[in-house]
Image: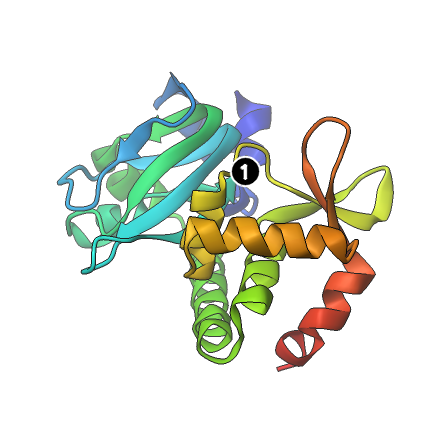
């Protein structure tokens, strides 16, 4: 457990004593794929760390559309804002594949972890990155056409192939509907654009069924956005 907690981004600055204290006070839960962990408006205040797997953070727009906000992978965390200000949950969280969660009680978080200066610095760094990514995403959605919006979000939802650094691999389990929720386009548009991108050899399906992308070709299409 200690090794797993030390890999969580917001705990990397924390001393061993605090990590051991967290280890003794954390509840482990295995969550099946496509399970709603939190709902927008929930009144719970616990903090969650992802020990294995990934989750999608979403919001429901006024017109009823689900909007993807963030993909959080192993080593990430969520729920800190409600634990800090006591407000209801501002977004929903859904598991993408099977997920191993560490659940930290609200009272323990407030009385022990939030009192640690090193943790607070890490949390500020995390929130700063979120704000910057949000600003970039707002700009991209406002200025890019559907094809570029899709590619940009697919990059954000992908990681570099460990065996081939010229290729990015989309996170497993993401449906066309989920990808569209991040890019602000319909599932039908995602399906059409992916077909077009495959014809251009920018993306393709691997033998295992994963979507992969040629980093150089993607960058050429997104150069005007990525350089802003």
**Residue 158 drawn at (x, y percent):** 64, 47
Residue 138's image quarter?
bottom left
**Residue 18 drawn at (x, y percent):** 45, 35
Q: Quadrant of the C terminus?
A: bottom right
- Camera sees residue 199: yes
Nearer to the camera, 67 or 135: 67
**Residue 62 drawn at (x, y percent):** 18, 60
Q: Which residue is mark 1?
A: 75
Is 106 drawn above or below residue 188 in the view shown? Answer: above
**Residue 22 drawn at (x, y percent):** 41, 29
Nearer to the camera, 44 or 34: 34
| Residue at (47% x, 59% y) in the render | 183
Q: Is residue 18 left or right of residue 152?
A: left
| Residue at (56% x, 53% y) in the render | 192
Instruction: Find numbered disc 1 in the image and state the secondary structure of the residue it sits on.
Output: loop
Q: Is residue 148 left or right of residue 117?
A: right
| Residue at (19% x, 55% y) in the render | 85
Residue 102's image quarter?
top left
Type of colouring: rainbow
Q: Is residue 123 left or right of residue 105?
A: right
- Camera sees residue 119: no
Nearer to the camera, 46 or 155: 155
């Amino acid at each position: 457990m200690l090794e797993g907690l030390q890999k969580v981004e917001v705990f990397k600055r924390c001393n061993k004593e605090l990590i051991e204290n967290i280890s003794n006070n954390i509840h482990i839960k295995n969550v099946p794929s496509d399970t709603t962990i939190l709902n927008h408006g929930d009144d719970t205040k616990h903090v969650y760390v992802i020990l294995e797997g990934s989750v999608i953070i979403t919001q429901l727009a006024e017109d009823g559309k689900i909007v993807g906000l963030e993909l959080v992978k192993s080593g990430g965390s969520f729920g800190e804002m409600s634990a800090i200000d006591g407000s209801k949950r501002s977004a929903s969280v859904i598991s993408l594949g099977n997920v191993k969660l560490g659940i930290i009680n609200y009272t323990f978080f407030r009385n022990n972890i939030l009192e640690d200066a090193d943790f607070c610095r890490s949390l500020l760094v995390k929130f700063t990155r979120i704000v910057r990514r949000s600003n970039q995403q707002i700009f991209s959605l406002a200025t890019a056409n559907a094809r570029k919006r899709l590619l940009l979000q697919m990059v954000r939802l992908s990681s570099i192939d460990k065996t081939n650094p010229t290729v990015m691999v989309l996170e497993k389990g993401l449906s066309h509907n989920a990808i569209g929720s991040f890019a602000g386009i319909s599932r039908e548009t995602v399906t059409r654009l992916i077909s077009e991108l495959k014809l251009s050899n920018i993306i393709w399906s691997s033998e295992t069924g994963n979507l992969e992308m040629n980093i150089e070709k993607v960058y050429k299409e997104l150069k005007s956005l990525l350089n802003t």
